[in-house]
Amino acid sequence: MATTRPYNFSAGPAAMPEAVLQRAAEEMLDWHGSGMGVMEMSHRGKEFGVIAAQAEADFRTLLAVPANFHILFIQGGGLGENAIVPLNLSRGTTADFVVTGSWSVKSHKEAQRYCTANIVASNTANGHTRLPEPSTWRMSSDTSYVHLCTNETINGVEFQELPDLAALGCEAPLVIDFSSHVASRSVDWSRVGLAFGGAQKNLGPAGLTIVVVRDDLLDRALKICPSAFNYKTVADNQSMYNTPPTWGIYVAGLTFQWLMHQTEGDLSGVAAMEQRNAAKARLLYDFIDNSAFYDNKVDGSCRSRMNIPFFLRDESRNEVFLTGAREAGLLQLKGHKSVGGMRASIYNAMPLAGVQALVGYMREFERKHA
């Protein structure tokens, strides 16, 4: 994919496919001859009804979401879901959390406001660089659900395979926060009860949250749960109980269509993106691992394909590195303030050429400063 734009490595809101941005720009003033832009439409009008229905159908196709799951388009983001999930699923009793980085720490802390939130496994002791083996998790006998962040955006650890809770003797549903790697790889829905994610990392603009929830989990909300965040109410009203993030749904829908047309060899859609993402990540990790100048601290068994933190071994050169990167058209590489260093987020919209450009810059910077 050729581009004249800089390569944006932001962790979110993140880069979007150029074709999606161009399509949205073309339709900004007049969607399909309606005389209205999408942001001006009633969410209950027939025009937006077409947009929302197509977006939902395309997302279901892309991720092979089974028929016994509802797809909800709501607001609140991942942080909002940290409250909305326990309000809907905990029944005010117990929920279990696997703490693997900054986001699952926040999820656990927020859930304590609504239920007994137990930490059943944690990688805090190793600095969030390795994942705790599922066989070591100690789930509560009465837990209402088990929560995972399947890709930690800040720490750069990712579950390469979802745990099989049933095989571990746990009958509770698995809840996954897949915000930062949704649609980058397939999902084994037989192991999931609920998945949620903000769109702003891999699917579209900030403001839209996608929740995929199994039918049998819809009617469990606490009485204090706001109606607009009650999953059953939202599902019963086809995500139109209140005004949804219409622009976010529309742009995400364009992104779904873009994803469906991506190919790698005989593969298409998410399968093609998974292969492409693996190749991009391998290129960057291989360079870092073979360099004495840069370092990635995450264990090879759980390295994220989407968010790659790395450090200059001589951190006094950080600002010089970032300044040169911006001049080279490589943007938003500064690591999160809580961990420092650098971070390259290489979501679906990041082409291989962008990663090649980053590796080329890193190699030249090392040559000049080693």
Image: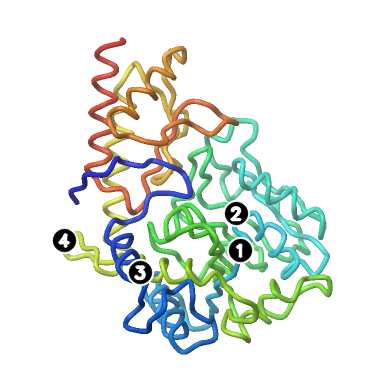
Give the labeled residue for mark 1.
174
126 to the left or right of 295? right
The structure residue drawn at horizontal position 61% and vertical position 38%, both measured from the top left corner, is 123
Identify whether 218 is placed above or below 318.
below
**Mark 3 in CB contact with mark 1 (< 8 angstroms):** no
- Which comes before the other along the chain, label 1 or label 4? 1
Give the labeled residue for mark 4.
265
CA separation in Å, label 1 and label 4: 33 Å
- Which comes before the other along the chain, label 2 or label 3? 2
Give amino acid for label 2: Leu
Give amino acid for label 3: Leu
Please state, as top left, top right, bottom left or bottom right, where the C terminus lies in the image. Answer: top left
Helix, strand or loop at mark 2: strand
Give the labeled residue for mark 2.
148
* Mark 2 or 3, closer to the camera: 3
Helix, strand or loop at mark 4: loop
Helix, strand or loop at mark 3: helix
- Which comes before the other along the chain, label 3 or label 4? 3
